[in-house]
Image (cartoon, grey):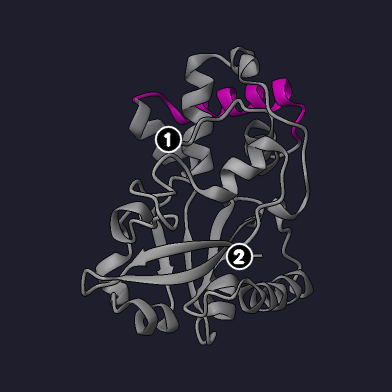
């Protein structure tokens, strides 16, 4: 399922929704999110979610997503992320209590997975759960793979040594949706060398595609997106 298909599904939803890359950069912000929190889309797209929303757990003082998206933390821990209650920052500077449901959705073959966050200013988790289930059903009907709905083995950071430092750099850029030419330019190497690194890291991870390599590395604790 392409990012455009996901955005089309969430565009006119009655609940707030935003889509992020794996490094928590906001790629899409729907109209309901504008209505609930007051931030216009053009003000938040391209920024990190924790810089904009500063989501705080009730009683907390540190943004709950500062050290990684709850979806990603759950994915690495082999858990299914659940709806959480947060105090989200509004454009006015105030706080609004909201129920937020995070999920990780696989992109198309040549595209990185996406973080999808749904939120509602009704703090009742049951309301958010119903909205999230409707989205899950629609996503699945359109052929999406919701990665965070499947529990996985607990990750082992000691397995990071499986890949070389350069292979980790390449894999990190792949996870953010960068293509061969862009990776080559950013790392100062040839496209041929990039392809060799991708082939090698796929073999080491037992992955039949770049997307599969990214997902395997996340689940095994090899890929650090912090």
Q: Position of residue 106 (x, y in %)?
A: 66, 54
**Is 148 on the left-hand or right-hand side of 181?**
right
Disc 2: CA contacts within 10 A as few (<14), some (14-19) or many (>=20): some
Front-most of residues 203 and 123: 123
**Any magenta on residue 186?**
no
Front-most of residues 176 and 190: 176
- Name the element at disc 2: loop
Q: Residue at x 59, y 76 (%)?
A: 124
Height in image: 203 above or below 38? Answer: above
The residue wearing badge 1 is 183
Q: Position of residue 46 (x, y in %)?
A: 32, 59
Q: CA distance from mark 2 to mark 1?
A: 21 Å
Tell me, yes or no, if residue 112 can be seen here: no
Front-most of residues 148 and 63: 63
- Name the element at disc 1: helix
Q: Which mark is residue 80?
A: none
Residue 72 found in image quarter: top right
Quarter of the image where the N terminus is located: bottom right
The residue wearing badge 2 is 2
Q: Residue at x 53, y 69 (%)?
A: 99
Which span is picked out in magenta?
188-207
Q: Residue at x 53, y 87 (%)?
A: 14
Height in image: 213 above or below 84? Answer: above
| Dot placed on the residue nearer the N-terminal end, 2 or 1 | 2
């Amino acid at each position: 399922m392409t990012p455009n298909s996901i955005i089309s599904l969430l565009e006119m939803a009655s609940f707030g929704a935003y889509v992020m890359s794996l490094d928590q950069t906001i790629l899409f912000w729907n109209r309901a999110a504008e209505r609930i929190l007051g931030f216009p889309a053009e003000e938040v797209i391209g920024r990190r979610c924790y810089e904009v929303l500063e989501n705080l757990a009730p009683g907390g003082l540190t943004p709950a997503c500062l050290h990684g998206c709850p979806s990603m933390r759950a994915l690495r821990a082999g858990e299914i992320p659940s709806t959480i209650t947060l105090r989200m920052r509004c454009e006015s500077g105030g706080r609004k209590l909201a129920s937020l449901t995070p999920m990780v959705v696989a992109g198309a073959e040549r595209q990185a997975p996406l973080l999808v966050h749904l939120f509602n200013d009704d703090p009742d988790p049951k309301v958010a759960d119903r909205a999230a289930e409707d989205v899950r059903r629609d996503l699945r009907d359109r052929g999406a793979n919701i990665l965070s709905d499947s529990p996985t083995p607990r990750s082992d950071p000691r397995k990071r040594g499986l890949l070389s430092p350069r292979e980790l750099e390449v894999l990190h850029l792949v996870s953010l949706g960068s293509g061969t030419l862009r990776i080559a330019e950013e790392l100062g190497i040839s496209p041929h060398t990039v392809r060799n690194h991708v082939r090698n890291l796929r073999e080491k991870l037992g992955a039949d595609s770049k997307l599969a390599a990214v997902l395997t590395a996340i689940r095994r604790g090899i890929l650090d997106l912090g």
